[in-house]
Amino acid sequence: MLKAIIWDVDGTLVDSEELHRTSFNRAFAKAGLGWCWDRSVYGRLLDVAGGRERIRHYAAMIGKDEETLPVSIPELHVMKSECYRQAVGRGELRLRPGVGRLLAEIRRAGLWLAMATSTSGTNVLQLFRTHLLTADHWRTIVPGDLVRKKKPAPDLYLKALKRLGLKPSECLAVEDSESGVAAAWEARIPVVATPNLYTRDHDFHLAVAVIDSLEHWECASGAGGVSVEDLVRLHAEGVQSSRRVCLSCRMVG
């Protein structure tokens, strides 16, 4: 039985990736780096989970020694986070279409809501301050600060399961990226993918379904977009698929 929906945040709950990209660029300008991530570059960097990790990966990619940077990578990430906080404070952040309606339906159905996100706890708190989401509505929140390995490692999801006290088969994950889907899959949680501008070309073969928009999905059971009934159905399909894979592994072994 489905008991909880575990959501990713950036690019899944909120349309935030473009805001993160421009915040990185503002921080780079303030630090005097001369770096500018366009959408193509940032799209590739999204394969790396975590802001500090993304900056470090880019520096290595262009052959820049961390020791030669005008500020340290942790300091640079703090600057970026402040730029992001200011942008959110200006009202530049929005929920993805259909998210608000679906979250309300999930709560009315008596299912739990949880977050498992590579973003920082500070960014999650900032999201609640916008009143786009309400903290009390979430059974547990696991930000990237709380684990050693971020997605595609399953650590965030495993910690969420432990906090919820649930089995993987009692949950459904919602993700926007290939690495997020892989993380849920490694935790044995059925997962649906909702790609965004930056992740449309990702490989989502591990997902139960790929839903371009929660507001308009051709396979939805009704005209109002993805519903709780759709999530329950997809969860059941995912659980059955996982069982077939496990059975196959046992037979091979």
Image (cartoon, grey):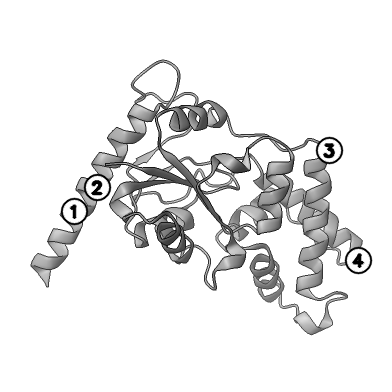
Q: What element carries label 3?
A: loop
Q: Is mark 4 on a helix, strand or loop?
A: loop
Quarter containing the C terminus: bottom left
Around disc 1, counting alpha carbons within 10 Å, would you say few (fewer than 14), some (14 to 19), or many (20 or more)?
few
Q: In this view, does 77 lie to the left or right of 251?
A: right
Mark 1 → mark 4, Cα distance in angstroms: 53 Å
Disc 1 residue type? Arg
**Residue under the point 82% across and 55% down:** 82
Find residue 110 and report its image quarter: top left
Q: Where is residue 5 in the image (x, y as percent from the top left)?
A: 42, 43
Mark 4 → mark 3, Cα distance in angstroms: 24 Å
Disc 2 residue type? Val
Q: Mark 2 points at which residue?
A: 239
**Residue under the point 49% across and 62% down:** 156
Mark 2 → mark 3, Cα distance in angstroms: 42 Å
Mark 1–mark 2 CB contact (< 8 Å): yes
Above or below: residue 110 compared with residue 19: above
Q: Position of residue 11 (x, y in %)?
A: 58, 44
Q: Mark 1 points at which residue?
A: 243
Residue 90: assigned label: 3
